[in-house]
Image (cartoon, grey):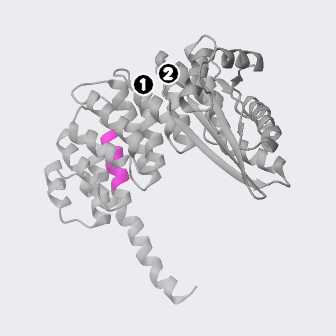
Amino acid sequence: MPRALCRAAPIALLLLIGAPAAAARLSRKPTAALLSRLEEAGPADRAALIDELARRRDPAAIPALARAAGDADRAVRRLAIAGLAAHGGSLADPTVDQALLSALQDVDPEVVAAAERALGARLAAGVEPGAAALQGALARLGRAAPGWTTRRSAAALLGMAPGGDPGPALIEIARLDAHPEVRRAAVTALGQRGVEAARPALSRVKNTDLDATVRLAAEAALARLGGPAQAAVVAVLPFSAQTADLAPFAASLQDSFTAAIAEGQGARVVERRQLEQALAELRGPAASQEGAVRVGALLRADQVVLGSVSRVGDEVTCVAKRVVVATGEVQATSAAGSTHDLAALQRACAARLLRTF
């Protein structure tokens, strides 16, 4: 054995032997004495002190545990959160709630997981004061926390709370969050809470979300709500052409977009006959945002797709727009390609629009 290891072995053995002895000494000291030692203790000593305080479940130690939940040392934070959780979900203390919310944003996954478990018990207990304020704070974190793991945890926790109305926040998260794991947590929470008002939003997510796991979660949430799942209704208007020679390509875009939306997004696309009838009834041009909304209203469609094609030299540009009938919101995209490969341009333009759903 190398000399360095020979010298280190007795030290390691002493540490192994000394740890239980030190823990035993701490266990014999009153809580007040342990609390007084925390202020000047190093990380290892703080961890031992917090561990002992957590084991006691002494209400006098709760403020110290709440402060230790923000300690610079990860081990101390883990032990502090575990100690707070040991008091159970009926502990209604705003300082503890804030400590757990802060821990939900921790860089250490184990701290986050411990905080999530503690907050879940707190929400399930539903003890006031502070339960309603806690839900509000979780809604804010779910909407705007910088880290996606925090947003996901917040959305999942909102599904556990027995009271309040987290529906609007969860619907917003399910529709708008950039990360699929967060959206999936939100739609699952909506199903758990049985938010009937979320049915239209869940139907849109089920039919239009780009992530398959999110679509499946939305389908499961709708199943928990009961009743038939609603499919998004999309009307694809004829594309306009800048010049007569581009008219055949513009006509083909309407067909290709119709097929791509129906197959790729699972939406129900308005039949050509119904669309032509609505266009015949419409007074004024349909190739505008206002016209598209009027056509959509006539057809009872949720969304309308329209667009145009133009050319400069050998370059053809396809502009496609998706209009939400209820709000008039517009999502636009464009793609450019060569006149020698219009099929590739057709695919690119459709794919870019689909990504906006």
Q: How crowded is mark 2: few (under 14 residues within 10 Å), some or many (20 or more)?
A: many
**Of label 1 and label 2, which has the lower sequence position?**
1
* Residue 298 visible at all: yes
115 or 30: nearer the eye? 115
Residue 76, position as x, y percentages in the image: 33, 56
Task: Residue 60: name its quadrant.
Answer: top left
Q: Report the amino acid beneath label 1.
A: Gly
Task: Residue 275: name its quadrant.
Answer: top right
- Judged from the image, the secondary structure of the residue bearing numbered disc 2 is helix
Task: Residue 133: name its quadrant.
Answer: top left
Q: Which residue lies furthest to the top in this view?
A: 227
Reply above or below: 237 against 95. Answer: above
1 and 2 marks in contact (CB < 8 Å): yes
Residue name at image x 43 percent, y 77 percent: 10
Q: Indicate the quadrant containing the N terminus: top left, top right, bottom left or bottom right.
A: bottom right
Residue 299, position as x, y percentages in the image: 63, 16
Which numbered disc covers residue 167?
1
- Judged from the image, the secondary structure of the residue bearing numbered disc 1 is helix
Q: Report the amino acid beneath label 2.
A: Ala
Magenta highlight range:
77-85
Residue name at image x 50 percent, y 29 percent: 328
**Residue, disc 2:** 198
